[in-house]
Image (tube, rainbow, N blue to C red):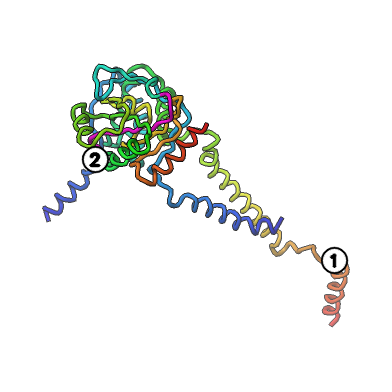
């Protein structure tokens, strides 16, 4: 029982062991925060579902070193992102930039939602028209006359 | 109008289906390189075999060539090496090497042992040139034209099938 408990406890912490560990010196806390946020936003080209902060692959480490160097050289975020994109492509950005190629990605969901809303409105609009209490006026004049006649006949009986 | 609304879901379904179908079987580990049709990045690194000799972009110009990024720690590089030897020897293709994040002595022994298909080898121990080339996994092979512009990139081993594709692309460059 105790053994199983220990095993489960160890497994719970195994995720921590997977995170990449290396040490960087930062000139101030703001730079450290920028390092962490950029490293979390840049995608590792080798192990594709990890960011470069997470990955242990050599290329992710190289990119972290480069990121650290650029931050200490006072590069702004746009320069760093450009540096990565000109080498590894838009792929490295977890949040792709808005461009001709990414319009569908950025605006597709909103467009689908809009289509959905329009369809729902059209369908519900039709339902309302068909609701009882508001009789259809699709009968022609002759049909109306015939209907009146038939109703009169019923009353006369 | 009504008919249009009725067939709209079908149209959307078929469109989405085709879009997703298109993605099936695509190798997601292959990232399109943004460096295609861009000039080879500048560098100033020593030759692997001659520590005194400094190589630059100018050394790679003159005729279409392959630029192969390799290392002794990379098993797939060993796997493709015989093919590179054959291409250089039998077909007279110019192959430049980038010895990527490697040890000079080990790399020299490796070339002695498995033969050297490279016209010249750029020694890039820190991977700086590799970084500028967007290398993320050796081996990677680039096609350079005579002006030193990158025309194509292949990630992974150059086997017979890949080489026939690369050869076609190089032939086109030579015709232009």
Say whether residue B154 is visible: yes
Q: Residue at coordinates 66% horizontally, 56% vertically from top-left?
A: B5
Callout 2: SS: helix
Distance Cα–Cα, label 2 vs label 1: 77 Å
Question: Hey, which residue is sitting farthest bottom in the picture?
Answer: A157
Say whether residue A41 is visible: no
Of the image marks 2 and 1, the number of the one nearer the N terminus: 2
Q: Is residue A28 magenta?
A: no
Q: Which subunit holds the residue at mark 2?
A: A
Q: Residue at coordinates 60% horizontally, 56% vertically from top-left?
A: B9
Q: Position of residue A2 (x, y in %)?
A: 11, 53
Q: Which residue is more in the foreground, A32 or B15? A: B15
Q: Pointer 1: residues within 10 angstroms few (<14), some, or many (20+)?
A: few
Task: Determine which residue is flagged by label 2.
Answer: A18
Of tags 2 and 1, which is closer to the observer? 2
Q: Position of residue A12 (x, y in %)?
A: 22, 46
Using residue A125 as the reference point, say whether residue B119 is left or right of it: left
Please state the extent of the stretch shown in magenta in the rendering: B61-74
Q: Which residue is more in the foreground, B7 or A6? A: B7
Could you say which disc has been placed on residue A140 in the image?
Answer: 1
Q: Residue at coordinates 39% horizontally, 44% vertically from top-left?
A: B162
Task: Give the quarter of the image for residue B126.
Answer: top left
Callout 1: SS: loop
Depicted B156 relative to depicted B19: above or below: above
């Amino acid at each position: 029982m105790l053994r199983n408990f220990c095993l489960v406890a160890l497994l719970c912490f195994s995720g921590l062991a997977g995170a990449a560990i290396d040490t960087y010196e930062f000139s101030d806390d703001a730079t450290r925060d920028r390092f962490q946020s950029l490293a979390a936003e840049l995608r590792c080209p080798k192990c594709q579902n990890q960011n470069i902060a997470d990955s242990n692959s050599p290329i992710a480490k190289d990119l972290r070193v480069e990121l650290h160097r650029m931050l200490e050289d006072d590069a702004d975020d746009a320069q760093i992102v450009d540096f990565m994109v000109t080498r590894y492509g838009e792929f490295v950005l977890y949040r792709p930039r808005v461009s001709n190629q990414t319009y569908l990605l950025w605006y597709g969901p909103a467009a689908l939602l809009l289509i959905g809303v329009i369809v729902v409105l059209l369908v519900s609009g039709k339902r309302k028209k068909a609701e009882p209490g508001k009789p259809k006026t699709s009968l022609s004049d002759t049909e109306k006359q015939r209907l009146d006649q038939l109703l009169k006949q019923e009353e006369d009986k | 109008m009504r008919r249009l609304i009725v067939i709209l879901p079908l149209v959307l379904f078929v469109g989405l289906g085709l879009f997703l179908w298109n993605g099936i079987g695509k190798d997601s580990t292959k990232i399109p390189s943004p460096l295609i049709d861009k000039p080879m990045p500048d560098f100033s690194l020593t030759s692997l075999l001659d520590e005194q000799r400094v190589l630059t972009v100018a050394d790679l110009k003159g005729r279409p060539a392959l630029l192969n990024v390799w290392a002794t720690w990379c098993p797939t590089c060993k796997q493709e090496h015989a093919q590179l030897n054959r291409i250089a020897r039998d077909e007279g293709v110019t192959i430049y090497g980038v010895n990527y994040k490697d040890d000079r002595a080990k790399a020299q022994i490796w070339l002695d042992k498995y033969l050297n298909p490279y016209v010249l080898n750029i020694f890039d121990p820190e991977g700086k040139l590799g970084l500028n080339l967007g290398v993320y996994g050796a081996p990677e092979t680039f096609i350079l034209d005579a002006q030193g512009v990158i025309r194509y990139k292949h990630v992974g081993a150059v086997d017979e099938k890949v080489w026939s594709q690369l050869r076609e692309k190089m032939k086109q460059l030579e015709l232009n």
